[in-house]
């Protein structure tokens, strides 16, 4: 099972879209193993966006993600990274497919509602940046898991 970090960004929280966004990931079949509302501080924001540190938009990213509360989720599932990114849609909302979060709810790249990890490695790293091991509940089974995941025996 892969893990991905989802951040419901300040624009989505301010617009009251948190529930709709969570609903879409649950409907997709991804399992929530961690969830919290928080105000990201500058140190965590800089750590999260470190890959963009040398880019001209780094300061604006940090300023934005620290500007208002966010909701962070750790999700788990088969091929969770690809499933979450398809659910989110293209970075630029006008290029995002209808039915995706950004395609249905977004207009501008600077207010694109949600972040999702872009690789398995980054998923693990980003989840660890926002959640301690004790805050993650991955060992529980949902009643629907047998209908969502095809478990194969060796």
Image (cartoon, grey):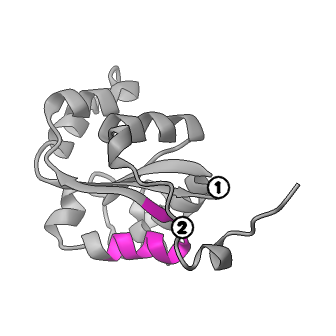
Residue 141 numbered mark, or none:
2
Q: Residue furthest right?
A: 154
- Residue 145: quadrant of the picture: bottom right
Task: Please give left or right for residue 110 compared with residue 101 in the image.
Answer: left
> Where does the C terminus fall, quadrant-wise?
bottom right
Q: Which residues are magenta?
A: 20-32
Give the residue at x 40% y 26%: 51
Residue at image mark 1: 79
Query: Percent x, y for residue 72?
Result: 30, 53
- Residue 120: quadrant of the picture: top right
| The one of 140 and 84 positioned closer to us in this rendering | 140
Query: Percent x, y for residue 54?
Result: 34, 20
In the image, residue 92 above or below residue 105: above
| Tag in front: 2 or 1 | 2
| The one of 150 and 99 positioned closer to us in this rendering | 150
Q: For residue 25: magenta?
A: yes
């Amino acid at each position: 099972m892969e893990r991905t970090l989802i951040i419901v960004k300040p624009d989505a929280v301010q617009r009251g879209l948190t529930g709709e966004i969570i609903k879409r990931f649950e409907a997709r079949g991804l399992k929530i193993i961690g969830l919290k509302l928080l105000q990201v501080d500058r140190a965590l924001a800089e750590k999260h966006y470190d890959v963009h540190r040398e880019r001209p938009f780094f300061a604006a990213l940090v300023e934005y993600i620290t500007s208002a509360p966010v909701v962070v989720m750790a999700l788990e599932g088969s091929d969770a990274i690809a499933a979450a990114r398809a659910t989110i849609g293209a970075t630029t909302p006008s290029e995002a497919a209808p039915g995706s979060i950004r395609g249905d709810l977004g207009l501008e790249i600077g207010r694109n509602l949600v972040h999702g990890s872009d690789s398995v490695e980054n998923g693990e790293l980003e989840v660890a940046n926002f959640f301690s091991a004790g805050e993650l509940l991955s060992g529980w089974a949902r009643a629907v898991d047998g209908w969502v995941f095809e478990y194969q025996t060796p």
